[in-house]
Amino acid sequence: MTYQRNGRVDSEQQNEPKSNMSQETLEEPKEKLYRVHGFEQIIEMLHIADPEFRNSLLRRIENQNPELALSLKKALSKTP
């Protein structure tokens, strides 16, 4: 930290975090991300999920990838 002649902190350094951790590290993630490998694993997870969550997830997938959402819905309807 450097000070100017008038005793004020240099403006460039004034806004720096006080620790050596970046601001990104300090922020909580908004959503926890999970990596899933395999279509069948996704189908199993959707089967055990409560209906409200399952439908919400399928809607979000449909917004990003309509073909995948259709495939998932078909697979869900075929399996018990």
Image (cartoon, rainbow, N blue to C red):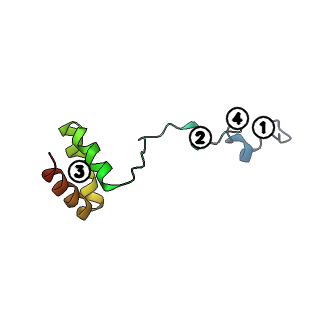
Mark sitting on residue 18: 4
On screen, 51 above or below 41?
above
Q: Quadrant of the N terminus?
A: top right
Mark sitting on residue 58: 3
Q: Quadrant of the C terminus?
A: top left
Disc 1 target residue: 8
Circle 2 crowding by C-alpha within 10 Å: few under 14, some 14–19, many from 20: few
Left or right: residue 35 compared with residue 16: left
Earlier residue among tags 3 and 4:
4
Q: CA distance from mark 3 to mark 4?
A: 43 Å
Circle 1 crowding by C-alpha within 10 Å: few under 14, some 14–19, many from 20: few
Q: Tag 4: residue type? A: Lys
Rendered residue at 50%/36% (across/down)? 28
Circle 4 crowding by C-alpha within 10 Å: few under 14, some 14–19, many from 20: few
Percent across and percent down for residue 77 are: 13, 51
Q: CA distance from mark 4 to mark 2?
A: 13 Å
Percent across and percent down for residue 30 are: 43, 40
Q: Tag 2: residue type? A: Thr
Rendered residue at 24%/57% (across/down)? 62
Q: CA distance from mark 3 to mark 1?
A: 55 Å
Whether pointer 4 and pointer 1 mark residues with C-beta atoms closer than 8 Å, the reply is no
Q: Tag 3: residue type? A: Leu
